[in-house]
Amino acid sequence: MNKMGTVPVKKLMLSMGIPIIISMMLQALYNIVDSAFVSNMDGGEQALNALTLAFPIQMLMVAVGIGTGVGVNVLLSKSLGQQNREKAARTAGNAVFLGAVITAVFMLFGIFGTKLYVSTQTSNPQIFDMAVTYLRICCITSFGIVFFSIFEKLLQSTGLSLHSTAAQISGAVINIVLDPVMIYGLLGFPALGVAGAAYATVIGQIASFSIALFCHVRFNKNVEKKLRYLKPRADIIKEIYAIGFPAIAAQALMSVMTYGINIVLVNVNEALVTAYGLYYKIQQFILFAAFGLRDAITPIVSFSHGMRDKKRISDGIKYGLGYTVALMIFGTVILEIIAVPLCSAFGLSAETESLCVSAARIISLSFVFAGINIALQGVFQALDCGLSSLATSLCRQLLFVLPVIYGLSLSVSPDLHNAWIVWLTFIISEFTTAVIASGLMFKIYKDKVRKL
């Protein structure tokens, strides 16, 4: 009997969620470690700025990979809940095909599009060269992160989140170990600077993909694996993206938001771009915990939806929201306590460090609302309400961010003494979105769950 339909939801969510949370937090950790090593090399603050400019495209790669994976996760879990193993197998096979297509697109962008993209955000030649170098390496070797995102979701959809965590941890450790070796030129390696950071990152991603692939082939017994299932099926792909496209759009909005914020802030002061870029990676350590729990909420609620089990759906929503809020409160307290020593570890100028500390202190007050929004997005996806998930993302990452931060940036003085005001954008955005998302959840529960 599949544990997704038998283990009590409260226990199942913890057993699935904790490994995913650890995995996601490790992913965020090696983003922070990347930044720490880069910021302490010669020209470190410029290098950190370059990584900030490259980051939206990296997030877009993750968005397309994970968004496709979310569609696969929900469709596969639901198919297994309906005892349709043939459809589950075709879903997994089509996921592999889609991964190959996504990889080809980002490889082409890496070869032909990086210079044009970076030139829209900076005119500093040193930052431009470093950003192009870093981003080109990440895009051309994007198969690691794309296929890991696919196989991670294949494992999570059948309750094997511990295996996906092992793959994520392995890649993170390899990345962290290789960072100083390849950036600074240790153990006989040449000092490659930001190129070394990029190579360390993609090698770690390839390692994670390789281990996730092995675990899927070896341990994922709920999914039949035959070459014929790799043949693309329009009906399967359409179903995957009916669920996954809103998730892709939601994740991609993070890229659009960061890109837009970079453009707004660079017109005020480059130090604001560097401070926000570093803080963004720091906050991911907390918010990725919410994303990890969401990745447990989605298959649990989706499987229960396939079973038409109202109580397990309700429990999934209740415990998912409860655990997420508790995590976000804990994360807020921790970040408020360690903001100063954490930001001082990156070799920043006094001005940039002060801006980063103010970002940590102010934006972290939005974490509880952000956690609610993230958890509800997972529920919306599981209940086949992708448009509600997309609407939530549009609100928290676009509609209530870019216009607000642009307006607030106009009041920042040239000496930046009141620059903290721009960080209020995120509290306004997350709170307003949480009110809207809660209203959507009430309506969806009334229309789809109560009637089961």
Image: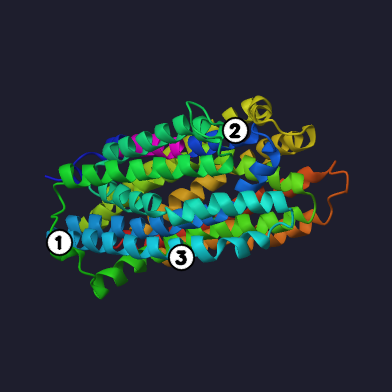
Residue 180 x, y percent position in the rendering: 52, 30
- Name the foreground residue: 408 vs 388: 408
- Amino acid type, mark 1: Leu
Q: Can residue 432 be seen in this snapshot?
A: no
- Magenta span includes 22: yes
Residue 128 x, y percent position in the rendering: 67, 54
Which color scheme is applied?
rainbow
- The span picked out in magenta is 16-27
Question: Mark 2 and mark 1: span between their CA atoms?
Answer: 44 Å
Disc 1 designates what residue?
227
Q: Which mark is residue 143?
A: none
Disc 2 designates what residue?
36
Left or right: residue 93 versus residue 194 is left
Which is nearer the N-term, disc 2 or disc 3?
2
- Quarter of the N terminus within the rendering: top left
Callout 3 secondary element: helix
- Magenta span includes 121: no
Q: Residues within 10 Å of mark 2 (few under 14, many from 20)?
A: many
* Residue at (30% x, 41% y) in the render: 164
Callout 2 secondary element: helix
Which is nearer the N-term, disc 2 or disc 1?
2
- Name the foreground residue: 252 vs 5: 252
Residue 304 x, y percent position in the rendering: 25, 53
Disc 3 designates what residue?
108
- Amino acid type, mark 2: Ala
* Residue at (77% x, 59% y) in the render: 407
Left or right: residue 385 versus residue 359 is left
Q: Can residue 277 be seen in this snapshot?
A: yes
- Name the foreground residue: 230 vs 280: 230
Residue 130 x, y percent position in the rendering: 62, 48
